[in-house]
Amino acid sequence: MLCVTLTPTKSLSKGQAVQAVGQLVASLSSHPDAVDTPVAGFKAHHHQVQGCLASPHEAVGLILSVARSAFWGMHLTLLPGHQGSDAMGSGGLQCDLDAALAVAGDALRAPGQVLVAMADSGAIIGPKEVPQLGAIESSLQLLSAIERRRSDEGQEAGVMVNAGNSSVTHSK
């Protein structure tokens, strides 16, 4: 499972922040394509929005949307000990979500920025402690940067990733 925490990267008045967070929660809570499938439960936490996603494909799609917005930064926390809807009510999951929320706002600086970390029993560890996270983070940062440029190549890469296809599969 993946925890996504979105934080505005621009200074806002309290009223603007409440409006922006409310609009984002409403947008993430309605999926016209979701027929008989659960919609991720994104919730507002002051000036941040947090929710869990079940698959990396959903996370990449959201990263591309965040990159296009040029307003939000994303902190993506891997939750290796929590899987599926059974984990949603567990105290350990809530501890990890709270920890992710606490570190996300301090880390993000630029619109479309993606930071990757992993939860470990209420502690958030990053690429310095787990080098594999650095490779994931740099790949997602590159994808986000390409999408922000809105080039033809960036749009094509975004469509392929959103569709869940690698470039090898796409070329066949």
Image (cartoon, rainbow, N blue to C red):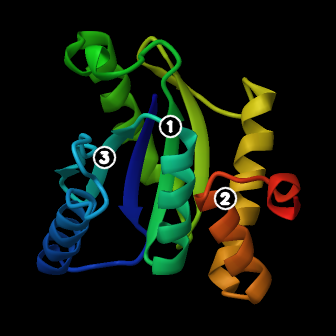
Label 3 to label 2: alpha-carbon separation = 23 Å
With 26 as the anchor, is 68 left or right in this view?
right
Disc number for residue 50: 3
Query: Amino acid under label 1?
Result: Ser
Above or below for 14 versus 170: below
**Location of residue 20 with respect to 129 vertically, above or below:** below
- Judge whether residue 70 can be spotted in this image: no
Residue 108 pos. (x, y %): 52, 58
**Which amino acid lies under the numbered mark 2 shown in the image of this protein?**
Val
Q: Earlier in the sequence, mark 3 or mark 2?
A: 3
Q: Quadrant of residue 33?
A: bottom left
Q: Quadrant of residue 94?
A: top left
Rounded to the nearest angstrom, the CA distance separating label 1 from label 2 is 13 Å
Among the two numbered marks 1 and 2 on one chain, the one whose residue lies closer to the N terminus = 1
Mark earlier in primary sequence (3, 1): 3
The answer to whether marks 3 and 2 mark residues whose Cβ atoms lie closer than 8 Å is: no
**171 lies above or below 4:** below
x and y percentages locating residue 130 in the rendered image? 74, 24
The residue beneath circle 2 is: 161
Q: Nearer the viewer, residue 43 or 41?
A: 41
Give SS at disc 1: loop
